[in-house]
Amino acid sequence: MSREVVVRVRVPSHYAGDVEREVRLAYAIDLFVRGVVSVERAAELAELSLYDFISELRRRGVTAYPYSDEELREELGIE
């Protein structure tokens, strides 16, 4: 049985933007970085595709996988 907690935060309207999306993303990234969830599960929690979630990680300087681009290509057999 899954439990949910609702958190209420006051945000000035000029900062609001899409706060719900940003909070989901920040929560998912935090869980991923702490090793609580896999990158795939974090993407689900953020309600993003795996590709979009990894792109967000990269944009924020967070490594999704401990491979360099060269190592990843080699591992996947991509030239």
Image (cartoon, rainbow, N blue to C red):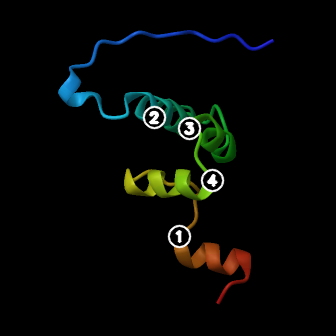
Q: Earlier in the sequence, mark 1 or mark 3?
A: 3
User: Which amino acid type is marked by label 2?
Assistant: Arg
Q: Nearer the viewer, mark 4 or mark 2?
A: 2
Mark 4 or mark 1, whichever is nearer to me: 4
Label 2 crowding class (10 Å Cα cut-off): few <14, some 14-19, many 20+? few
Front position in the image: 16 or 55: 16
Mark 1 and mark 3 in contact? Answer it, CB < 8 Å.
no
Which quadrant would residue 37 be assigned to in this image? Answer: top right
Counting residues from the N terminus, which is met first, the one under dot 1 or under dot 2? Answer: 2
Neighbours of disc 3 within 10 Å: few (<14), some (14-19), many (20+) = many
**Dots 1 and 2: beta carbons under 8 Å?**
no
Question: Residue 5 at x, y = what percent?
Answer: 57, 9
Instruction: Tell me where residue 2 sits by quadrant.
Output: top right
Residue nearest the observer in this picture, 37 or 20: 20
Query: In the rendered structure, which disc, 2 or 3, sits on the residue that comes first in sequence?
Result: 2
Write the residue at 58% across / 65% down.
67
Q: Which residue matches tag 2?
A: 21
Q: CA distance from mark 3 to mark 4?
A: 10 Å
Which label belongs to residue 50?
A: 4
Check contact, mark 2 vs mark 3: CB within 8 A. no
Residue 25 lies, in percent from the top left, at 48, 37
Give the SS element for disc 3.
Answer: helix
Taking 53 as reference, is 17 above or below it?
A: above
Q: Which mark is residue 68?
A: 1
